[in-house]
Image (cartoon, rainbow, N blue to C red):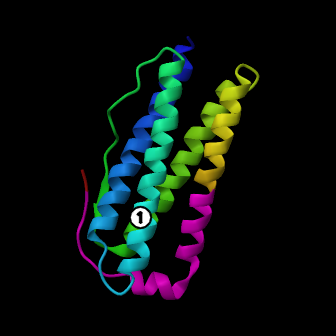
Amino acid sequence: MDQAMIDKLNEILRHEWTGVAQYSQAAFVVTGLWREVYNEIFLESAKESFGHAQIIGQKIAALGGVPTIERNQVKQTDDLHEMLKNALEFESMAVKHYEEALAMADGKNRPLVVLLEEVLLQEQDGVDQFTMILKDPAVAAQAKGGNASKVG
């Protein structure tokens, strides 16, 4: 058992649990003209985070570790533009975590490298998606509104 790798995977798992909560919360509270569009995007992102949590949790157990049930703080807001910025930040951090884990596994555990690369591609797709949404000035302007922001 490589404890450093298990610790890194548990850090990733905490991040994915955070995504489940943060994206679900965004889907619950998004309002306005774009609700149907963004509600679906946020719900799909929550499902993706849960799927990643399943993969990583199972790998931690297979490596002899105990998967964490903890999560990081969730960023909450009712401002759509802020939700989208939070989503981009979340996806960017996920890419960083998976890249770090890949560096640790490279040359030591090829199947783990392949698994991490597959998830990394999905995380990078999330970065690309939210980057492109936030680049649209019309969407960004329409998304501004709301007034509450907090971390929980």
Question: On screen, 145 above or below 99?
Answer: below
Give the vertical position of 97 relative to 75 (above or below). Answer: above
Which residue is at a point 56% across and 82% down the rendered structure image?
Answer: 136
Residue at the spot 32% in from the left edge and 34% down from the top edge = 70
Mark 1: which amino acid?
Answer: Phe
Q: Position of residue 107 (x, y in %)?
A: 76, 22
* Residue corresponding to mark 1: 42
Q: Main secondary structure of the magenta part?
A: helix
Q: Residues within 10 Å of mark 1 (few under 14, many from 20)?
A: many
Q: Is residue 79 left or right of residue 66?
A: left
Residue at left offset 44%, top offset 43%: 16
Q: Position of residue 129 (x, y in %)?
A: 58, 67
**Residue 116 location, quadrant:** top right
Q: Quadrant of the N terminus?
A: top right
Return the residue nearer the eye: 20 or 141: 20
Of residues 104 and 48, the one drawn nearer to the viewer in this rendering: 48
Q: For the magenta stretch, what is the residue range?
A: 125-150
Q: Is residue 93 left or right of residue 145?
A: right
Residue at x 48% of width, y 45% of height: 51
